Every structure is written in structure tokens, then in C-alpha cells.
Amino acid sequence: MKKIIMAAVLAASTAALFAYNPPMGGEEFLRLSNPEMLSGAASSAAGGPSGNVIPASITYNPALPSGNEIITFDLSGTALINYDKEDFDKSTGYAFETGVIVPTKFAAFAFTTSYTCSEMNGMPLGKIWDMHTGASKDVLDWLSVGANVYFRSYSKTGFGKKYGFGTDVGAVAKVGDFAFLKNVRLGASLLNVGKPAKFTTRGIDPVKACSKYPTIMTPRAGVAAQVFESGKWKGFFSADLCMPTFLTNAISDIALEFAYGENLKLNTSWQYNIREWAKGGSDGICTVSLGVSYRFGTKLGKKDSSVIPSFATQSLYSGILALSAGARVDFGQRDTSGAEIEMW
């Protein structure tokens, strides 16, 4: 009986591995529409190198907004430029995203929606409208949990539409200091638990049929911490590992952040997708991303608030350049001081 079960598991795993063939960029297309996601500032299961959380962060871990104390709104867009275009290929593509985080006494609620249009041969994602909404809560001083529901619509010029929907779950743990690392955070999530859409496009291996993407049952784990402080400069890092469909692929994502004071942040990240490198060769290689953001104080109504414009760029597959810009608004100021006790 044990041999039969092991043979069945092996056969299922082999079939999944053989069928796994998403398009270039298909597993992480949600990072394309926002500069803070593209640069690695917010695209981690642990919340980005310095714990930066934006509405789109819930697509990597729905537990992340639990620590937000104020309402956050963002709006961003990305131009995709095919500067190494072949004959009969599309010259451009685009993406945009908007979302909001609303903290309450009960839980933090988040919503994000994005639209990505990329029909270029090097990244044939089609036209994808994605919508995520979720809730997260601190259950212990050091532990937060959260869950999303999502809906996706896929379409392609000359073809019909396909739909996918499902849920994500996640958790974030604050570990504290460890050796030279400060404010260590661990994050883990299980993404795309639901119905993926069978969408007709070209996969990493153009000879085989394209598989459904992003892949169902995708675990993701990340760690982030502060690594140094010198004067007004601070350095942070995050490292994520994503394994679509449990071991059919592995994607690592490493990000660094250098912050000057409380306002200026410089970010860079790099992704290593084993399947894209193995099957796509040089066309499956992305360069490092670069990003910058700056916080401006402003008065919105009676509250002191912040506006944070950000910019990022990255050279993607087959000579496709992403140029992304956006702005985030924090309505109010985060409480960074300790509690005060007044006597008499």
C-alpha cells in the first residue's frame, strides 16, 4: 500500500513538473505596476527591508498591514518599453495600480487593484485585471495573521476572457534583535489557493502549452532586518523564497535599502527564477532594479500627513525596460514615541 501511495505521489509530482510552463514574468507580474514593488521596497513576505507596507504588499503576504496605524492610499503606473523589438512585435506595454489600507480597532483592512497589459513576445502576459482585498490583525505582541480574497480577469487581443479567483493566507512574526541584525521579521504566506485561469499564451518553453499562472498553492517565505547604522544612514535587507506549486520551481528575491534620515530611501533588488534561467537562457534574465522615494510633510485637513513619491526602473526579459512612478499618501503621522504618564 505504501509503495502504491508513493508511486501515485511521484507520478503527480512528475506530471506537475512537466506541465509547469508559465510565461516569462507570469509568477510575479503583480510587482510590475508599482515602483515600491518593482524596486523591492515593499515586495517581500516580511514587509520589505525596512518594514515598508503599501496596499499592494498584501499580494505577497496578507498579514502585513496589521501594524499600520494610519490610513494609506497609493496610485502608480508603469511604462513597459520594448527597446529590442523584433518584427511584428509590440513596442510597448503598461501597468497601473491603486489601493488603500484602513486600520480599525478590530483589524486592518486593505484593498488593491491593478491592470497589466503586456503582449510583447518577451513577456506575453496578455491583459490582466487583478483585485485583492483582505484583513489582518495582531493576535500577539509579536505575531500577526491575515487573509485575502482575490479575483483575476485575463484577456488577449483576438481571444476571449478567462477568470480566476481564490484566497491567500499569511503570518508575520517580529523576532527582535539577533547578533548584529536589528528588528528581525519573519513572514510566511500561502498564495493562489483557488481556481487559476487556463489562459492561452506562450510559456517559458514555447514548444509546450502554457500552464495556468500564477501557479496554484504557492508558498512564500521571507526575512528582513536592519544590518547597520552610521550617522543618519541606515541599511536594511530582505530575502524571499517562493516555490510555485511546491518544488516545481524556485524564485529567490533579494532586496537592499539605504535610508538617509526619515525621508530619503534608495532601493535595489534582484530576482532569480530557476525555471526562467534554465529554459529561457539570456532572455530569462532580469537585471537589478533601482528605486528611490522621498517623504514630504504636508497638511491635509487638520492633520500633519505625508506624501511619498517614488520612482523605479528595471530591465526585464528580452530587452523590455520598465519605468515606474507613483505616490503614496499617509493620512496622519505614525506614533514613534513611547507612552507618556502624567501624575497629578
Image: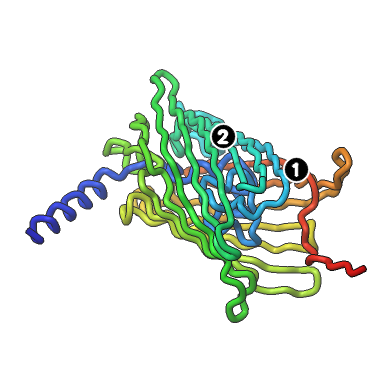
Q: Earlier in the sequence, mark 1 or mark 2?
A: 2
On the image, the x and y values in percent for residue 113 come to 57, 34
Residue at image coords 22%, 52%:
13
- Give the CA distance from mark 1 to mark 2: 18 Å
Give amino acid for label 1: Val
Q: Disc 2 on helix, strand or loop?
A: strand
Between 155 and 82, the one nearer to me in the picture: 155
| Residue where numbered disc 2 is placed | 114
Residue at image coords 76%, 47%:
308
User: In the image, 286: left or right of 208?
Assistant: right
| Residue 329: mark | 1
On the image, the x and y values in percent for residue 23 come to 39, 40
Residue at image coords 58%, 56%:
138
Give amino acid for label 2: Ser
On the image, the x and y values in percent for residue 342 come to 88, 67
Between 309 and 67, the one nearer to me in the picture: 67
User: In the image, 313: left or right of 328?
Assistant: left
